[in-house]
Amino acid sequence: MAVLNLTDVQVAVHGLVGTAALLTGRALAQSGRVQKVTVDPSSGAVRGVVRDGKVARAVEVTSRYRADGVFEAGEGLCACGAAPCQHVAALILAHFDKPTAPESTKETRRTRAKPAPAPQPAPWETALTTALAPPPAAVDHGRRHASSIPRPHEPASAAAPPVALQFELMSDPGFRIGVRPVVPGRNGGWVRSNISWYSLGYPEYHMPLVPRSQVRLLRELHALPSAHDHSYRDKVLMLDSIISRRVWDLLREIQETGLPLVMAGRGAVPVHVLHEPVVARVLLQRREAGLVLEPVLEGAGQQVTRGYLPISDPPHGVAWQPSPGEGLRLARLSAAPPQLFWQLSQGDIPPIPAADEERFLSEFYPQLSRHLEVVSPDNSLVLPAAQPPVLELTVTPLGDHRMQLDWAWAYRLGAASRHSPLQTRPGQIPPGRDVTAETRTLDAIRPLLSEFPDLTQNPISGVIPLAQSMVHGVTTARLMSQTIPLLRERPDVDVRLAGPGGDATALSGRRFPLAGHAVRSSPRRCAGRRHGPGQDRADPGALPARSRERSER
């Protein structure tokens, strides 16, 4: 029977993995197959790469010498997933089982000299080291998950990244963008062999040299919601089907980690993800043939007029190729352009003759600017300036001390005017709305309406007037004599009186008929005057005392 001469380290490893794995691991260690061995100074974990044939296995062990000098073979993690594992044995033996001088054959393991105990750190050092150390990874004796398998630390001077993302323009039936992982080829360039999105499910086997941070980003990219179902078994991921705006943050993070983004083909032209968003707008310029409209995407020093591919529906980004042979440019949109923009970009718009210029500016330009930003980059045309929003209050008398109040926003552009609802839907900003200016106006008039809780509502944004309300009696008199004159003094509020035919005219110092009486809207006499202790007298232009008493009853 053959007798194995084992060192203390080999005896401990034998108890951990058994005879077969010990012998194979010792052969791997003695033949120099254990490489890139590093020690984590905080946790003491030993990491390395064991090359077994043509496959490199990432291994981590927690073995150590105890304070009494006895070697302890701790648990190990290996990308192969086998238990017992010969690669764990190889790393332990390569790092801890150093050759020593020949010993006497009569000396037994119990009488061998034990190594001197390592110097103990100071108490403060122990406390800080424990606090700063990352939490230990859980040991899984079954299948290893990708998040728990250590990745080898690649040196800074690595020749080439172990993986890249390849972008390919496909026609299915229109132009689409397919994305897939690729690996370096033997003759340079990138190849699709032996890697796919399926490899992300088992990175410890298929992608052992890829940094863990890049694996995490690739997994998150593949898991984003898509308009079409896909799985790890699909060869390509359709970028234009991803409906989540998170894709732009991920693409930028992937690019910043150093993972190459390349085009399909021998040239492997780089793909660029812009850090700044692009804005959809319409350029309006005067030419010899007339006014020329051109929809463009601008941002980050780029101006794209044609050939851009929207990403998702509704689009949250775009892709374009500056010229044939160049790599794609990818950028997120600052806001989803309206359908009008995509309609304008599908074909050339005939020039507007000089004879029709005035009609275009008065009728079509206000509608166009309501949905899109229209600019004249060369200042060849002076466009009507958009005015800040005005809060419009329309007062409609109904007789018998009653009136109706209607609130809306008025946006004026040149001679044209459009009205928008008082309140927008939560999370939605309609095109052409200046929400900041609207909020500023509502905040300013809120104290004036605090005395009329029945005329206001309290959404998430704060107290605002009801879009339509009815008032009568004393409330009518108080509004006309006190509140409305103060509103009229504000430049961002327009109070209008609806006539018998429904037309509204500006209310300026008019006498307002209320069932045979009149209330003058005057900013100079708007508040009640106090005549003696506890006595109030209304504005002389307000309702007479008998009318007030009747309305109160």
Image: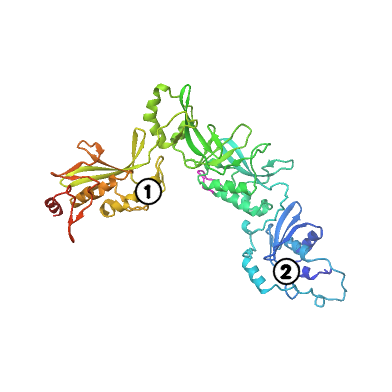
- Neighbour tally class for label 2: few under 14, some 14-19, many 20 plus, Cα within 10 Å: some
Q: Looking at the image, is mark 2 or mark 1 nearer the viewer?
A: 1
Q: Between 439 and 210, which is closer to the camera in this rendering? A: 439
- The relative height of residue 241 versus residue 220 in the rendered view (above or below) is above
Q: Quadrant of the N terminus?
A: bottom right
* Predominant secondary structure, magenta span: loop
Q: Between 300 and 536, which is closer to the camera in this rendering? A: 536
Q: SS class of the residue under badge 2?
A: strand
Q: Residue 64 carries which label?
A: 2
Q: Residue furthest bottom?
A: 111
Q: Residue furthest left?
A: 546
Q: Earlier in the sequence, mark 2 or mark 1?
A: 2
- Expressed as whole percent of the image width and height from the top left, the position of residue 47 reads 71, 60
| Residue denoted by label 1 | 440
Residue 298 in view here: yes
Q: Are circles 2 and 1 on residues that touch, CB within 8 Å?
A: no
Q: SS class of the residue under badge 1?
A: helix
- Left or right relative to 290: residue 498: left
Q: Which amino acid does label 2 sit on?
A: Arg
Q: Between 319 and 389, which is closer to the camera in this rendering? A: 389
- The relative height of residue 1 versus residue 398 in the rendered view (above or below) is below
Residue range in magenta is 224-230
- Neighbour tally class for label 1: few under 14, some 14-19, many 20 plus, Cα within 10 Å: few
Is residue 228 found inside the magenta-colored segment of the image?
yes
Question: Which of the colour schemes (rainbow, by chain, secondary structure, one colour) is used?
Answer: rainbow
- Left or right relative to 313: residue 79: right
Is residue 39 found inside the magenta-colored segment of the image?
no
Q: Quadrant of the C terminus?
A: bottom left
